[in-house]
Structure formats: structure tokens, C-alpha cells
Amino acid sequence: MSRNSRGRSSASTCFQFRNEVEIEMAGVSHPKICVLGLDCAAPEILFNDHRLKNVQRLMARGMWGRLESIIPPITVPAWMCMATSQDPGSLGVYGFRNRANHTYGGLSFVNSSSISEPAIWDHLASQGKRSIVMGLPPGYPPRPIKGMRIGCFLTPDTAKHEFTYPSEIGPEIRALVGDYPVDVPGFRTDDKVWLRDQIFEMSRKQWKVVRWLLAEKEWDYFHFVDIGLDRVHHGFWDCFDRQHVHYKPGNAYENVIPDYYVWLDEQIGAVADMLGDNGVLLVVSDHGAQRLDGGFAINEWLTREGLLVLNEMPDTVAPFAKLKVDWAKTRVWSEGGYYARIFFNVEGREPRGIIPAKHYEAFRDEVKQKIEALNDPQGRPLNSQVFKPEQIYRKVCNVAPDLIVYFGGLYWRSIGSVGHGRLHVDENDTGPDACNHAQFGAFVLCAPGLEAHGEYQGAHLLDISPTLLDVAGYPLLSTMQGRSLHAH
């Protein structure tokens, strides 16, 4: 078996693989699997910008297409849904923040211990394979695996907190790039120049670490998530999308998003050259991106409907956590975000629940219909989608929302604060934000012996891990909810 000595692009000539591209164990040869995750990558850009020569090259070699995300299409838990092939209900994680119990104490933040289902790298470890997982959320604190983990954007501060497993990798990364950024703190800002420069600086360091890890460390499975693309979209989508309500022709930042895609294409090309033709290479996003037309003040609406009762209305805009809620009279409350989580105050379930359990389902249908009937500021149907968790998930673990809502097909975000004096708002109550997540992301897959080529329709996020196992010659796992695209 020959060693891979590729390194044709200038970005990869400093690095050579130490390991053989194919690892032999028990007489079976398995190609390396390399996953390059582009958080929030939009298929309409990734597939149609012909300046992305390396992506186009991979598309010509393999299979590609839109990739349906989970409900809701949120970074956490989407990447772990992909890695485990389990839906959010089965993981018991419905977003960045979740109810820890049925009290009124607010939502708790997800961390790496929130996920208990085994991921693809755990299955590979059982067969003696080593993995490197970098930037995949939730990745803090970094949990031990057979291989290495480098923390994600949830890491508080890489200078003060342990962000790698094993811990000795941290000093090696600092020696390579200096301070290691996992995110751009304060990315919700109107300072576009600062934001653009910070995102590119973060990305340069992260991709340098990617190439170093690929070349110098032992691995059979590699998974990196570039969070910079998500930050570019949220910061600059209104400068790029001509349909955006705030788009101004000829603005100074119109090319920031396309330029970042071109930059990513160069990095993808460097990694593809390092891997060669004998490895499995997947470029994939957890969800897409689309314009944000505004926000719907869900708790403001609930107070008008008499479903959320306050002891007093705030004088100024106030977040839900600071509202003085009369729980003895409140039946429904919600939280803000890219989608709405609707919670009911149920008798015998919540401490001061008032919705009789026997009326729960009829009441839930009534609220669902009210939300579906909401209009936009011009009085036209908002066309919101309302989901019942047990109807969209294989099982429902932990404390799920009673309803999950996409306002206006995700063109409107959920505003949890109260005191706006209106239901439709232009401002995001968490800071400037130009886009929302879209239901469809993208994938491009190249692998030796891949039977399907060209555009593939009908792929789902949960199909990714079964497909990777299949194309690399590993047995599929019956516990995974997705299917292999290789056999269809």
C-alpha cells in the first residue's frame, strides 16, 4: 500500500500525511473519512457560484444535493443529530436552551454532557478507529473520545478553560496559531468592518489547525465545523440578498458573503488534495440560510389573547425572564429565538398548572389554530408552521416544548420580550441579525466506489452517518434513524 504524498496546493505543501490513506484492520481495508462542516451553508450559493472551483470539482466526482435538516434547523442539536442519526426528540435536545424540568425557572444551556446517544466516532472507536472532532457543537467541555476533540463556539475562553481532549493538544495549537478563537464574541454588531475582519482572522487560524491535524495526527475519522460561515450570514445577509428588506444596492459589504465562500472553497481544495482520491470526503451543512423579514412578538400576542397574564406590563421592552408573571392565571408562555417554543401550564405537571390534563389536547389544537391564523403587518396570512413534537420525532425525551413554531416559514423570528406595543417588529431582541436558518442545507460527497453520482434528491440530515459508514465499508447500525444514500 502506498503512502499519500499529495500536497499540490500552496495551502497544503507544508503538510504531508503521516498515516496511510487506508487503514487495514482484521483484513478489512477502510478509507479515511473526512467531514468538512460548513455551518449554515446555503445550497443556492454553494452549488451555483461557479467561482467555487473546488466544490464544482467535487460535485463532478461524486454526489451532491440539498439536505433536509431537522425540526428545528438549529446548530444545536443539528450537528449531533447528524453524528448520531437521531432526531432532536430522541436526543432530548430541542435547541441551544431547553427546559430542565417543569418548573418556571427558565431554560438551561446545552453542553457536551447533554448528549448521551453514541455518535459515529463512538461506533468507529469500538472497531479500534481513531477520530478527530473539531469545533462540532456542543463540544464544551471536551469529552474524552478515542482520538482528539477541540472545543466549539460554546467554549467560554480558550485562554482560561480547557478546550481540547487530551489537554496537551491545547499548547500545541497555541504554538501553531497563538490564541485560538472558537467564535467571534459580540458578532451581533453593526460594526461591519470589525466583524468581517474578525471572522476571517478566526477562520484562517482554524483552517491552519485543520491542515496540521490532518497531516500530523493519527485519525481514521475527521470532522470539522466552520462556524465562520454562520457568523458571516447572520452579519451580512442583508448586504447580500437583494430580496432582504434592508438591502441597499451597491453597499460596501455586498461581497463579504461571496468572498467568504471563495475563501472556504480554497480551504476545501487544499484538504481534498491532501486526502487524494482514496478517502471519503464530505462537505456538508447543518441547515441553510434565508433572509429575516422581522420578528413576531409571541409573548406580546399571548398577553393580548389572555393566555399569558402579567401582574403588571413593563414600561419598556423587557425580556421574558424579567416579566412578573401571574402563574395562577397564565396558561401559555413562550421563548424567543429563530423559532418559537410554546409551553403550557398544565394541571398536575407544572407547579401551578391550570390547564386540566383532560383538556390538554383540545387546548393545544386551539392554540395551534390561532397561531396558524396569524397575519403579517399588511394583514396577509403569515403562513406559520406549528408542530407537535410527538408527531415529528420518533420519541420525545426530556422536557419538550408543547408546540414548535416557524413564524412565516422562518422568515420571521420569535421575539420573547414584551413591551413593544406591537406584534411585528423590525429589531431582533438579541442584537443585529440579518438572516434566519433555512430548512435545507447542502452536501457534496466523494468516495471510492460511490455508485450514485450527480444531483441527489431526498437526502436528510439523519442519513449522513449511515451513508458515511456504508461508503467506508463499515456495518450499518439498526439504532440509527437515517438510511444510507449509497444504496438508493
Image: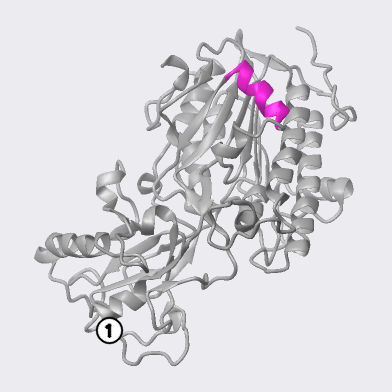
Q: Residue at x 35, y 48 (%)?
A: 89
Where is residue 368? Give x, y as percent.
23, 60
Looking at the rendered structure, the number of numbered marks drawn on it comes to 1
Quarter location, residue 272: top right
Q: Is residue 265 left or right of residue 485?
A: right
Q: Residue at x 77, y 62 (%)?
A: 193
Looking at the image, can residue 400 be seen? Answer: no
Residue sticking out furthest to the left: 358
Q: Is residue 184 left or right of residue 350?
A: right
- Check disc 1: other Cα within 10 Å, few if <14, some if 14-19, many if 20+: many
Q: Residue at x 69, y 64 (%)?
A: 185
Quadrant location of the N terminus? top right
Where is residue 426? Give x, y as percent.
50, 71
Looking at the image, can residue 42 be seen? Answer: yes
Quadrant location of the C terminus? top left
Where is residue 7? Give x, y as percent.
84, 23
Dominant SS of magenta comes to helix
Instruction: Please tell me which residue lies in front, 161 or 344.
Output: 344
Query: Tag 1's secondary structure?
Result: loop
Instruction: Please tell me which residue lies in front, 18 or 254.
Output: 254
Instruction: Please tell me which residue lies in front, 423 or 308.
Output: 423
482 above or below 145? Answer: above
Identify the amino acid type marked 1. Answer: Val
Quarter location, residue 103: bottom left
Which stretch did the figure color magenta? 52-62
Where is residue 264? Give x, y as percent.
72, 39
Q: Is residue 487 left or right of residue 128?
A: left
151 above or below 463? Answer: below
Instruction: Please tell me which residue lies in front, 389 or 187.
Output: 187
| Residue bearing the label numbered 1 | 309
104 above or below 292? Answer: below
Q: Residue at x 71, y 27 (%)?
A: 54
